[in-house]
Amino acid sequence: MTITKQSTLQEVALTVGAALDRHGVKAVLTGGACASIHSAGEYTSLDLDFVVTHQTTQPMLDIALGDIGFNRSGDRYLHPDTRFWVEFPRGPLAVGGDYKIRPTTLRGNAGRANLLSATDSCRDRLAAFYHWNDRQSLEVAVHIARRQKVNLRKIRQWSAQEDHLEQFEEFQNRVRDRR
């Protein structure tokens, strides 16, 4: 797919994911872009964070993204026809102290991309709430839990391991109140 000024975040994510895959780069969409997709746009992000899960070189990334019109500028990739940019934060792929992440695959007309599951995306947002008291991230986690089927038991167990059960209860109450 060609990226245009009308391309949505999801279309850009799928196009980037497909390009990475074609070039043998294994990466998983995380962060705000993933939360935006799982919250059905209730939260918006302009950057797409892909965590590389296998050994890759900078030239491999440059070629893969260059093939779809992105150019590297410092630590991000910019495209002249979209407001969205791509970054590759340092791994490993994890949510808080949990490194056993099993990504899911998003498919669409523009291609496919690996991304955090709705449950892991919710936990990713909660990690920002737990560790930095980021209230916006709490709200995004609530949006995800309201829009997607998430495993609240897994989130609770993880929250206990992160030593944040009290904050989990606040999250769970907000999810219940908004259903």
Image: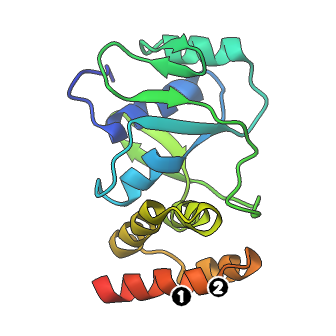
Looking at the rendered structure, the secondary structure element under dot 1 is: helix
Decide if residue 106 is on the left or right side of residue 63.
left
Measure the alpha-carbon separation of dots 1 and 2: 6 Å
The residue under the point 53% across, 68% down is 119
Q: Quadrant of the N terminus?
A: top left
| Residue picked out by circle 2 | 165
Please give the label number shown on residue 135.
none
Decide if residue 50 is on the left or right side of residue 7.
right
Q: Quadrant of residue 166?
A: bottom right
Decide if residue 104 is on the left or right side of residue 94.
left
| Residue picked out by circle 1 | 169
* Figure check: 78 above or below 125: above
Which of 3 and 122 lies nearest the eye of the viewer? 122
Image coords of residue 3 (percent x, y)? 31, 22
The residue under the point 43% across, 88% down is 173
Confirm or deny contact between disc 1 and disc 2 (CB under 8 A): yes
Q: Quadrant of residue 175?
A: bottom left
Q: Quadrant of residue 110?
A: top left
Looking at the rendered structure, the secondary structure element under dot 2 is: helix
Residues packed near mark 1 inside 10 Å, few (<14), some (14 to 19) or many (20 plus): few
